[in-house]
Image (cartoon, rainbow, N blue to C red):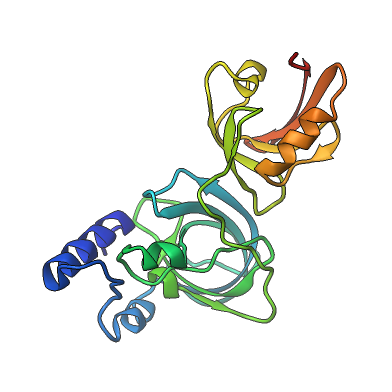
């Protein structure tokens, strides 16, 4: 089975050659059902956490999901109820497809608390799983937590970062500009910014007011690889 990168490249080439114009390209009829039938794992899960990773491409956001197995329908790796698993997912916005992106159906933008059935595979020798049927690997059960798709990461110029609102709350830092306040305080790409001077930061637009409200010092709370850190620094002049 080809990887995501390989599949999207193949689909793009076929679509361009056949249509000579931007268009959305799905897999052939019945392909998704075939992938589901051949999936190694068919599980009911509850997602515990979703962490954004480096994007697969400019149009594709990339996520690592941690989940608990609620029920096992079939499992080649002999998973049991209560097992903890990790798998990668991705997201392509409708706007990207409208702009000419080609590829299989996008999965939903997931959040902690999502519950449903999922079709997964696992390569030999690896511990993490991958989607068996791409965007149709998910079958939600019941009411699901909602996450609004995000545009390209907005920039907080005063702090010197770009970031997306994190699905678990806070702001996922994507880039840190050199010689900026963020650089001086030691922020890194991959950090999850939680508060500035006690103010919750859930988007880039929250940063400016929090900085303005600071007095002589800034108090920053962040999550770095699961460790909560408190940073104190002098307010810039």
Q: Residue at x 28, y 76 (%)?
A: 27
| Residue in front for this viewpoint, 174 or 45 | 174
102 vs 110, left or right, is: left
Horizontally, residue 188 falls left or right of residue 36, namely right
- In the rendered image, residue 224, in percent from the top left (x then y), is placed at 65, 33
Work out whether residue 52 or residue 200 is closer to the camera in this orientation and state it. Answer: 200
Q: Quadrant of residue 215?
A: top right
Q: Is residue 225 above or below residue 94?
A: above
Where residue 155 appears, x then y in whole percent? 58, 38
> Does 197 sit left or right of 91 as displayed?
right
User: How far across and down, in percent of the image, does residue 52 sit?
Assistant: 54, 48
Compare residues 116 and 211 and report the one nearer the observer: 211
State the image coordinates of residue 80 (x, y, percent, origin top left). Answer: 58, 68
Instruction: State the residue at coordinates (84%, 25%).
Output: 214
Total tally of numbered discs in the picture: 0
Looking at this rendering, what residue extends furthest in the bottom direction? 30
Q: Quadrant of the C terminus?
A: top right
Camera-side residue: 236 or 6? 236
Horizontal relation, residue 198 to residue 3: left or right: right
Q: Which residue is pictured at 30% across the width and 65% down the height?
A: 102
Q: Residue at image x 47%, y 68%?
A: 107
Q: Is residue 139 positioned above or below 227 on the image?
A: below
Which quadrant of the figure has residue 199? top right
The N terminus - image quarter: bottom left
Q: Is residue 25 shown above or below 49?
A: below
Q: Quadrant of residue 96?
A: bottom left
């Amino acid at each position: 089975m080809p990887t995501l990168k390989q599949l999207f490249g193949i689909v793009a080439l076929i679509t361009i050659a056949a249509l000579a114009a931007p268009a959305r390209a799905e897999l052939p009829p019945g392909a998704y059902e075939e992938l589901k039938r051949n999936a190694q794992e068919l599980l009911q899960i509850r997602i515990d956490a979703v962490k954004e990773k480096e994007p697969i491409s400019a149009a594709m956001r990339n996520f690592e999901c941690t989940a608990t197995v609620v029920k096992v329908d079939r499992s080649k790796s002999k998973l049991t109820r209560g097992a903890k698993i990790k798998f990668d997912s991705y997201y392509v916005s409708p706007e990207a497809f409208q702009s000419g992106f080609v590829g299989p159906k996008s999965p939903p933008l997931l959040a902690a608390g999502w519950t449903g059935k999922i079709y997964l595979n696992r390569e030999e020798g690896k511990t993490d799983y991958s989607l068996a049927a791409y965007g149709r690997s998910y079958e939600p059960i019941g009411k699901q937590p909602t996450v609004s798709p995000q545009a390209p990461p907005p920039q907080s110029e005063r702090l010197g970062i770009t970031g997306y609102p994190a699905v678990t709350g806070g702001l996922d830092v994507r880039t840190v500009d050199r010689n900026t306040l963020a650089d001086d305080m030691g922020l890194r790409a991959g950090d999850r910014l939680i508060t500035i001077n006690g103010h919750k930061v859930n988007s880039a637009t929250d940063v400016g007011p929090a900085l303005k409200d600071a007095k002589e010092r800034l108090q920053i709370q962040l999550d770095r690889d699961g460790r909560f850190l408190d940073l104190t620094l002098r307010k810039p002049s």
